[in-house]
Image: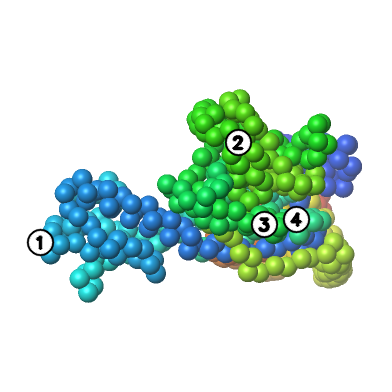
Amino acid sequence: MLYFSKLRIIFISIISLFFFIIASNNLLDPNNRFFDKKINLGLDLQGGSYLLLEIDNSPVIEQKLQNKSTLIRSYFKDKGIRISNLKLSNDKIKFSVEEKFKQNVIDEFIDENSDINPFYPRFKSHQFDINEVDNFIELTFSKQGLVELKTSSQDQALEIVRRRIDEIGTNEPNILKRGNSRILVELPGLDDPMRIKSLLGKTANLTFRFISTDNQSSFGVEKIEYEDGSNTDFVSKRIILSGDNLLDAQPRMNNQTNETVVSFTLDRVGAKRFGKATASNIGRKLAIVLDGKIISAPVIRDTIASGSGQISGGFTFQSATDLALLLRSGALPAPLNIIEERTVGPDLGQDSIKAGIIALTIGFILVIIYMFMKYKFFGLITNITLITNLIILIGILTLFEVTLTLPGIAGIILTVGMAVDANVLIFERIKEEIKNEKNNIIAFDSGYTKSKTAILDANVTTLLAAVILFFMGSGPIKGFSVTLGVGIFTTLFSVYFIARLFTAIYVSRYKDKEVLI
């Protein structure tokens, strides 16, 4: 029946007032807000940068295979099986073995109970494929092994990218996986995209290695160029320390030389190793190598046992800050390449907001005029309900701090249309009931009751579509699905609680009137 208890009326009023207060947060000054929540504007509305990064897994594959090849040589040496011609090329480990041991070697890789399986779990069917080609045994990553490697690399890269962006303090970044080798980065409101590109484009692989004066070393040497391109040096391949041993890195001013440096602190293991290496190599130059370039090569004057030090290299304060940030966030597992880039200016974002508001306003005004002309006083009830519906919708989006995009505004506009559609179905059904029922209260109650199935069917099917779009779609599509999905719930609430309450009050007061609608 068209009856609302006092408790239900109080409940409807509190809910509406609560979301009205929350929605008003978006219009208030940050210092005067009731809650520390608001709707965030997406990239297309606020402006900012869009970057699609692709992970270059080639170095990771090479490094993994290099580690495996060393392990293979050691393992079979302990077994008394001589491995010869062991080499790595074209993402394959190739080696030869005496014919009498060949089958034993192959069995070691594919046997579940083999001692080598802790390092190579079920090679043939899991991580690796093993084949015999031209008297060589070839080991390559299987398809599943490559997928696992790429997924692991992507997870690590995603975390490092997130750390670097969080260090800068960008508001509401959107960092998502794309496939198993790409990362999408959306940075609303970013005013320095070149700096972000520079930070994300660096692997930040830091190593400390001694410079070799005689071009010879028991660990081998390699020729490395200085970062400024001024010179090259032969550097030992033996790594004294890596970035993994860093606890912290901060930009500092050296009071003695008045230059900007990066001060770093090592963990306990790193400090012990660094102290031992510097104690036995006083007078030698220590190369600090970042991403294959020497950024500094100071001479060791004394034992460094404190576990802290400085990196100098003619830094500006900005470059020192960025280097410290990279070292703190850790090295990427593989290089990242920017394959797609878009920048949305704040002016364009404001234009999008204005266009969306204009579209919403025009549509809203046309709906109000039509409903008032068509249903008179009940059209006015519908219009009040629509406004309340929008306020509740904005309140819910504010409560969950949703990021609003241009497609999200489209979802709000569609919600208005669906709310009107529900009211039209109800009022037209009421007209049919009045033809057969003289009691206005019963006719109106039947109209609401009998139209419920059609309204629920329409909204539930739309909700299912919104859920599918949310889980299957990308950023802008998700924005549309969120506002549409939330709008369905607010529409049902506003139609069957708010509009029905106003209708019940009016019909109860004028129940004897011949024509109510």
Q: Which one is in front in this view, the residue at disc 1 or the one at disc 4?
A: 1
Q: Which one is in front in this view, the residue at disc 4 or the one at disc 3?
A: 3
| Mark 3 residue type | Asn
Residue occupying the far bottom of the picture: 134
Q: Point out residue 344 in the picture as x, y percentages from the top left corner.
A: 79, 65
N-term-proximal mark, 4 vs 2: 4
Residue drawn at the location 63% of the way across and 56% of the way down: 232
Classed neighbour count for the residue bearing mark 2: other residues with Cα under 10 Å, few (<14), some (14–19), many (≥20)? few
Which residue lies under the disc numbered 4?
195
Residue drawn at the location 64% of the way across and 32% of the way down: 301
Which residue lies under the disc numbered 1?
100
Q: Point out residue 101 in the picture as x, y percentages from the top left corner.
A: 13, 59
In this orientation, which residue lies closer to the viewer: 440 or 262?
262
Q: Circle 2 sits in a helix, a strand or a loop, which is it?
A: loop
| Mark 2 residue type | Gly
N-term-proximal mark, 4 vs 3: 4
Quote the CA–CA distance across marks 2 and 1.
Answer: 53 Å
| The quarter of the displayed image where residue 110 is located | bottom left
Residue 156 appearing in the image: no
N-term-proximal mark, 1 vs 4: 1
| The quarter of the displayed image where residue 248 is located | top right
| Mark 1 residue type | Lys
Q: How is the image coloured?
A: rainbow
N-term-proximal mark, 2 vs 1: 1
Classed neighbour count for the residue bearing mark 3: other residues with Cα under 10 Å, few (<14), some (14–19), many (≥20)? few
N-term-proximal mark, 1 vs 3: 1
Q: Point out residue 370 in the picture as x, y percentages from the top left corner.
A: 83, 71
Which residue lies under the disc numbered 3?
231
Q: Circle 3 sits in a helix, a strand or a loop, which is it?
A: loop
Q: Is residue 503 above or below residue 410?
A: above
